[in-house]
Amino acid sequence: MRNSKWFGAALASALLVTGGAGSIVATSSNVSAAAAVNTSAVKTAKATWKVNSLPVAFSTIDSSGYKLYSLSEVAGELGAKVILSSNGFELNDSKGLHIVQLQAGAKSYLVDGVSQQFTVAPVLYNGKVYVELTKLVTALGGELTAEDQSILSFARPEGQFDTLHWNADGSIIANRSDSETAQLLKFSAFPGVYDIFSSNESALDFAVSPDQKWGAFTDEKGQLNLISLSSGAISPLGTDTSVKMDLVWSQDGKTIYFIQGDKQEKIGQISVETGAVKTLLEDKVENKSELRLSADSKSVVYIVNVTGVAKNDTDSTEDSLTVDFSKAGEQLYKLDLSTKDAKPAALTTALDNKLYPEILANGAVAYLSADPDGNAANTLKSIGADGAITNIALDVEPSWSTGVATGLIVSGTAADGSTTIYSIDANGSKTSLFHTTEDVSEVAVSHDGSKLAIVSDGKVLLIQNGQALQLTK
């Protein structure tokens, strides 16, 4: 959403005169004679900048070897309010966050009460005041990039970001990981437009509902909470405080499934409408994780981390204790929720690490296979209905994947170190969505799959139609 172009003027002790659209004409009562320039030595011109992605031609003059810009035109494009008085000019940004006070002919100016210095003092020429562009833009909270002649009404936030989520209105929610206190920011698709979304430490990560209107998370007491992804309002769901991990929503948004228990030994669910908790599986097998739910809610897939088995001889001494790691590793299991008292079925037996499991629309289970010793490249695998495991061919080494309605979104690294993000349909056909020479540490997919949010070098970027838009600095 673009900021409206408006500026007002109030009469203090001086007369305010407008000279055409978007101009302010200074009078002798508020501008000293020293502020005026010799008209015969001035060169006028137009300079075009992209302001909030749209081209704008500003009036400029050359003064003492510096290019100065029309104060009224720049302020108007940034949505700033300009007040003219006998003491000079007061500018207020459209969010009401900054107050800038300056005078024509004076190098010193105030930004939120703090003194700053122009390199060249603002000057009066033909009844209009001209100022340094960069210092005016930054004083009003904007951002200027000289390399591509671009200006943003509001500067993008700086920092290291992670934990990306989309919401229903197309905003991106991200955690500022280098902040001293918990800080979730919500970004629009327009650089510089963002808000503080939440400062709740427990809400830094959450499971997003299928309609992307709600997030679910547990706090330090085990209480399950819902957070509105529009307003950030948080409300408790139920009263159960047992350990709940790997939250996943049903497609109708009425139920949340989770790994339950201090040792992650159970699978449970909670009704979003009533808060009632129900245990679905209690087989005493510990270390469950990465719970996934089929679209029809009839089955779940999860990982069991199989640990080493301790063995003792007849003396049962500490020295005789040994641990057998021959079968240790991660294994995928599937549980049929539609059949009463169904037992989990093992889908894998190999000792590779298994990451990012997904139940696809056709019933297959996809996952990323990684060598625990790091001696072999990662591969993307699929488990068919018959239990056969096959590789999904890629020309990159996969590092991340997620399921979408049409199949999979996969990110991988090529031999030259570049990163490519692919969409893979049910037939295995690949479509390249984005390619970059930079490292990509995280990817999030919009609800319709048309847009991506990525973290690259700690920065948040929006990817649409193969083009990247950087939302943070």
Image (cartoon, rainbow, N blue to C red):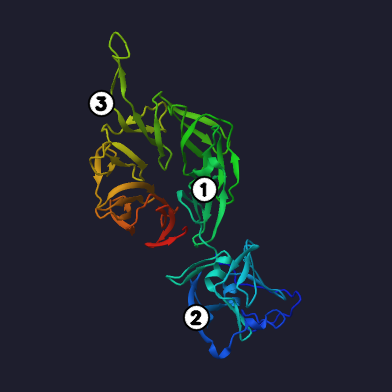
Q: Earlier in the sequence, mark 3 or mark 1?
A: 1
Report whether 36 appears left or right of 419.
right
Q: What secondary structure is marked by label 2?
A: loop
Q: Is residue 211 visible?
A: no
Q: Amino acid at mark 3?
A: Ser
On-image quarter of the N terminus: bottom right
Helix, strand or loop status at disc 1? loop
Asked if residue 222 lies left or right of residue 347, the reply is: right
Where does label 1 land, which residue?
179
Residue 289 left/right relative to 324: right
How many numbered circles does the render carry? 3
Image position, residue 117 (x, y; %): 58, 69
Label 2 amino acid? Gly
Closer-to-camera residue (421/104): 104
Closer-to-camera residue (237/371):
371
**Which mark is first along the chain, 1 or 2?**
2
Q: CA distance from mark 2 to mark 1?
A: 42 Å
The kind of secondary structure element at disc 3 is loop
The residue lying furthest to the bottom in this view is 40
* Residue named by callout 3: 326
